[in-house]
Amino acid sequence: MELPRARVLLPDGGASACEGGWERRRRRIAANIEEVALRLFAESGFRNVTVDEIAAASHVSSRTVARYFPAKMDILLAKPRRSIEVVLQALRRIDPAERPVLRSVWQVWMELAAQYRDELGSLLLWTRAAATAPEYVALALGEQHLVLSEAYKELIAGALGTDPASDIKAEVLAAAVEAAGRAVLQFWVDQKGEPDLERLFASAISALTREFAAAGAAGSAAGAAGSAAGRPGVVKRRPAAPGGPATPGAEPGRSHRRA
């Protein structure tokens, strides 16, 4: 039976330069348990592997496995949860007042591309293991979407000078940005990392920018036509292109800070 395809997530976090010897040892033990468990999940299926089998293959006790991962599910979700924090840390370094915030987001994507390449082997292993437990993949993706969309929304709202509680623009555009980044990574992993990741990100950025500019031009033209017809409040919207919304920018006909 063909297994369902797992969705790829985000880059992993590395060791901190300020870690002491004990922290490094704990990280090594946890990393070993996680890698062994993922290989077992990929080979035999998540439900068919027991904690005792993971412990034996990792050369530790079952109690040690439970100390690092209270539930078997936590082993499978450890990588995506660490990865979300890596991206959040990069986004927190962006100052919306410095320059157009989306340019900073694109730069974060490009900087993380090198880390993705270095972790291709572990990403492919996680994908194979996660394909045997689609319900936990859905849980991980739900966490990723909620956390990253919220982070993007705060950045974009700050750049536009809007209140997301009363203006939906930032939330819609944040969802588009989050989905675009996820789509690029999924395509790259589906292709076993063969395409150049920076080129894929650049292509996605170009497509988003181009489509939003086209949508803005169409909206401005429709608004002008409506005004000429004596109906300034009526603007016909062009149907959204397949693949979702495009890159944030100023609303046609109004002056905003650039995102």
Image: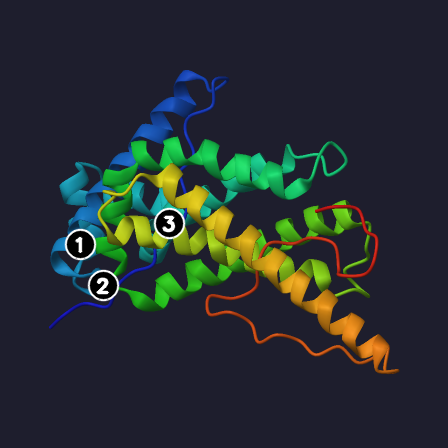
Q: Quadrant of residue 159?
A: top right
- Position of residue 7 relative to residue 55, above or below, is below
At a point 77% along the width and 72% down the height, the residue shown is 223
The circle on residue 42 is 1
At a point 23% along the width and 63% down the height, the residue shown is 132
At a point 34% along the width and 54% down the height, the residue shown is 186
In front: 230, or 138?
A: 230
Camera-side mark, 1 or 3: 3
Provide residue 218's location: percent of width, then percent of height.
Answer: 66, 67
Question: Disc 1 vs disc 2: Cβ atoms closer than 8 Å?
Answer: yes
Q: Secondary structure at mark 1?
A: helix
Q: Kindly identify the amino acid type of the residue bearing the numbered disc 3.
A: Leu
Q: Kindly identify the amino acid type of the residue bearing the numbered disc 1.
A: Ala
- Position of residue 89 relative to residue 160, above or below, is above
Provide residue 153's location: percent of width, then percent of height.
Answer: 67, 54
10 Å neighbourhood of mark 1: few (<14), some, or many (≥20)?
Answer: many
Residue at mark 3: 185
Provide residue 213's location: percent of width, then percent of height.
Answer: 62, 56
